[in-house]
């Protein structure tokens, strides 16, 4: 089995690479080759039985992926993207990376005859927005209120259509906001959702730019990687007629997240969170819905985190293990 990952040097790409190398198989078939692509050269430890190919490549360059697609990967994880606040700040950059490069990837798959290849793309709750019902499901109309959400929604439609035409075997996972993300803050509008836990638990202060009654739909990094791996195993007919799946997350308010911070890190950790409203961030994040009915995803075998305490405890345990 040959797997190709775009955006492999990113947060999810690195975790997915680690999980694939650890499991050594996809859908019961031995993983023999892993091709990692990112504009920043991806790094992975050598492996005895899996051929690793790490490429520094700008996927927006015309034909960038064509020779790799000619090598007929059986599963493609398309994770390369410009994240939400960056795509909002720079329309051209977001359109080029998030939309045009995805379209070029689909065309490359079509030209290479990759009808059987499972193409898995990471989409987002940002495809929804504006006036919405209290609870959404996979079939709620996509009415994004950000350029990032619009670019993801356009890619979803294209992947559905290329799959319907039998040009690719697509699967789109709409990811909840991923919490707790290790490392440093990034340009995602939701970056604060990790910062307000990660920094205080590490002894640093963090800024909370949104009101505490704001709700988010969240999933832990571990569960997202499990979902990406699971998506490679789904039979094509389970994905018909619509290939976009909202993953099961947890609905949690910022206030509830801070309660968990206090439970796990104590009053001193909670005191490290400073409230500093940022209307630009609030406008983006508040447009994302936080309540979903995800029975379809659950029927297909995707699993939510048990509770928010578990998400934070797992983060703390992973951070200690990494040290
Ligand atoms: N993290 C989240 O909360 C979240 C939520 C919903 C959806 N997603 C989606 O999941 C995917 C992965 O997210 P992440 O958190 O790992 O993001 P990330 O920013 O850590 O990784 C994205 C990677 O894409 C690469 N990239 C950007 N432009 C490129 C280009 N022109 N050519 C090659 N590589 C390029 C970047 O270098 C980066 O390594 C993205 O598609 C993102 O939109 C993430």
Image (cartoon, helix red, strand yellow):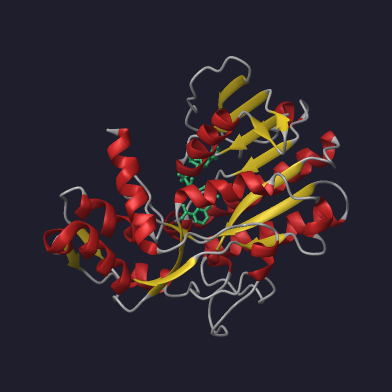
Q: Can the viewer see residue 308?
A: yes
**Residue at x 51% of width, y 61% of height:** 176
Location of residue 251 with respect to 148 vertically, above or below: below
Taking the image as shown, residue 46 lies to the left or right of residue 50, namely: left
**Residue at x 56% of width, y 83% of height:** 132
Location of residue 273 with respect to 2 vertically, above or below: below
Give the percent coordinates (x, y) of residue 6.
59, 38
Give the percent coordinates (x, y) of residue 263.
23, 63
Of the pair 167 and 176, the residue shown nearer to us: 176
Q: How many marks?
A: 0
Taking the image as shown, residue 285 lies to the left or right of residue 273, namely: right
Q: Residue furthest top?
A: 48
Q: If the image is split into quadrants, where does the N terminus sit? A: top right
Of the pair 171 and 152, the residue shown nearer to us: 171
Of the pair 266 and 68, the residue shown nearer to us: 266
**Residue at x 67% of width, y 24% of height:** 33
Give the percent coordinates (x, y) of residue 153.
64, 63
Q: Can the viewer see residue 57?
A: no
Of the pair 210 and 187, the residue shown nearer to us: 210
**Residue at x 74% of width, y 50% of height:** 234
Q: If the image is split into quadrants, where does the C terminus sit? A: top left
Give the percent coordinates (x, y) of residue 296.
69, 67
Res. 17 image quadrant: top right
Res. 266 image quadrant: bottom left
Location of residue 71 with respect to 276 vertically, above or below: above
């Amino acid at each position: 089995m040959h797997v190709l990952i775009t955006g492999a040097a990113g947060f999810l790409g690195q975790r997915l690479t680690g999980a694939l190398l650890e499991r050594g198989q996809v859908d019961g078939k031995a993983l023999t080759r892993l091709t990692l692509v990112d504009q920043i050269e991806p790094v992975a430890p050598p492996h005895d039985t899996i051929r690793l190919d790490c490429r520094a490549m700008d996927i927006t360059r015309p034909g960038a992926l064509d020779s790799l697609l000619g090598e007929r990967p059986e599963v493609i994880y398309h994770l390369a993207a410009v994240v939400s606040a960056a795509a909002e700040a720079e329309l051209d950059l977001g359109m080029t990376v998030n939309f045009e490069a995805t379209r070029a990837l689909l065309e490359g798959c079509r030209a290479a005859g990759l009808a059987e290849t499972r193409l898995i793309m990471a989409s987002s709750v940002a495809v929804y927005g504006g006036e919405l019902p209290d609870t959404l499901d996979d079939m709620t109309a996509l009415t994004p209120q950000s350029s990032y959400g619009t670019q993801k929604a356009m890619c979803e439609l294209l992947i559905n259509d290329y799959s319907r035409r039998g040009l690719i075997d697509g699967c789109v996972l709409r990811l909840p906001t991923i919490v707790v993300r290790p490392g440093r803050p990034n340009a995602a509008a939701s970056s604060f959702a990790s910062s307000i836990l990660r920094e205080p638990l590490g002894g640093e202060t963090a800024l909370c730019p949104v009101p505490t009654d704001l709700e988010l739909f969240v999933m832990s990094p571990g569960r997202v990687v499990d979902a990406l791996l699971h998506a490679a195993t789904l039979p094509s007919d389970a994905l018909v007629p619509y290939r976009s799946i909202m993953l099961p997350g947890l609905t949690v308010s910022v206030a509830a997240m801070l309660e968990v911070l206090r439970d796990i890190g104590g009053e001193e950790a909670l005191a490290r969170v400073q409230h500093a409203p940022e209307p630009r961030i609030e406008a983006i994040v508040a447009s994302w819905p936080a309540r979903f009915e995800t029975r379809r995803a659950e029927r297909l075998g995707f699993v939510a985190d048990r509770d928010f305490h578990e998400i934070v405890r797992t983060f703390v345990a992973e951070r200690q293990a990494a040290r």
